[in-house]
Image (spheres, rainbow, N blue to C red):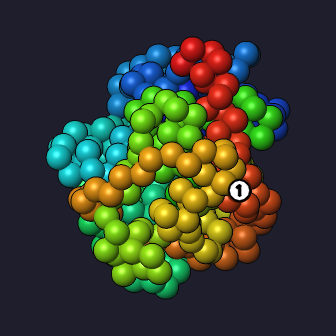
Amino acid sequence: MTVLVTGGAGYIGGHMVLGLKDAGEKVVVIDNLSTGFAWAIPEGIELIVGDFGDGDLVQRVIAEHGVDAIAHFGAKIVVPESVTDPLGYYRNNTANALTLMECAVKHGVKHFIFSSTAAVYGETGSAPVTETTPLAPISPYGRSKLMVEWMLEDAARAHDLRYVALRYFNVAGADPKGRLGQSAKNATHLIKVGAQTALGRRSSMSIFGVDYPTRDGTCERDFIHVSDLIDAHLDALAYLRRGGASLVCNCGYGHGATVKEVIDVVKQVSGVDFKVEISPRRAGDPAVIVARAERARETLGWKPKRDNLEEIVRQAIDWERRLHNRGL
């Protein structure tokens, strides 16, 4: 049995590859390296450079490697960019995922784990969201992911395919063993940008909007350690292999930190009082998104162990130093 990881040379997909390898699974990766890195693939794992929307390529990989499960991470993820390039997001995130699903069904791949997002909820108010919270995405990014959830739901009804869609909240941190972290230079992740600024790789960073209805006027998010998120994926794979029914789960800690609070933690951990500028709101940013994730705990048996913002920030900064030492 082999797990195909799409986007496995990127941040979250790369951590999934590490998690699967650590668990003794056979893994093959498809990644076009548009935002991922070939060096992120550990020794012994085959990287096939290509697009998960290339049906011929995907079918060949499934057949040659005996793929029985797909963990799908390949996607465009920048919310403001999706507002200016909606068709590019629908093509990459939605249309290409359709091709991937068709290949899975055609070749009898029965298990599918999908990297979804809290952006499917849109503006939710201040209360933590559950999987039954109404879905009203406010960006093409969120809509592109929700469409994939709908396609999976319909495909699972019609075919011998079961899936778990995991709705991520804000993923942060780095592999505790120091093997991988957020490596894209132009990443927009708040903690990544903060780490770069603290280490002098940026002259300043921006807060986008200080007039939101939150405790300090800045957006509030539920920050989850990337390794806890990967544990949820591994639990989802085991659940499907046990015969579990198709499922949608939130992945978050159930409490949030505001942008200002995160920046304060970055300054505290790094010991650097860097420059922060105030900028207008970004299109597509809801004020608050915080998870309730009891379903993942109760159904998948997920037990997050790294709910510590200071440690998440410390690992992100440590990884940023490693990148700098490598000349990246």
Q: Quadrant of the C terminus?
A: top right
The answer to whether residue 36 is left or right of residue 93 is right
Residue 181, located in which quarter of the rendered image?
top right
Residue under the image location 60 percent in, 45 percent down: 272
Residue under the image location 79 percent in, 60 percent down: 305
Residue in the foreground of this view, choosing between 289 and 325:
325
Where residue 293 sits: x, y (%)? Answer: 63, 73
Relative to 183, say whether 287 is above or below: below
Where residue 208 sits: x, y (%)? Answer: 33, 58
Q: What's under tag 1, amino acid-wise?
A: Glu
- Residue 136 visible in the picture: yes
Relative to 313, say whether 221 is above or below: below
Residue under the image location 65 percent in, 28 percent down: 321
Residue in the foreground of this view, choosing between 328 and 155:
328
The answer to whether residue 97 is left or right of residue 273 is left
Residue under the image location 48 percent in, 50 percent down: 190
Relative to 122, say whether 140 is above or below: above
Residue 152, located in which quarter of the rendered image?
bottom left
Where residue 32 sits: x, y (%)? Answer: 42, 22
Residue in the foreground of this view, choosing between 211 and 186:
211
The answer to whether residue 284 is left or right of residue 118 is left
- Residue 69 visible in the picture: no
Relative to 238, say whether 196 is above or below: above
Where residue 232 sits: x, y (%)? Answer: 68, 56
Asked which secondary structure carries label 1, the reply is helix
Q: How many marks?
A: 1
Q: Quadrant of the N terminus?
A: top right
How many C-alpha atoms fall within 10 Å of the one at disc 1: few (<14), some, or many (≥20)?
some
Q: Which residue is mark 1?
A: 310
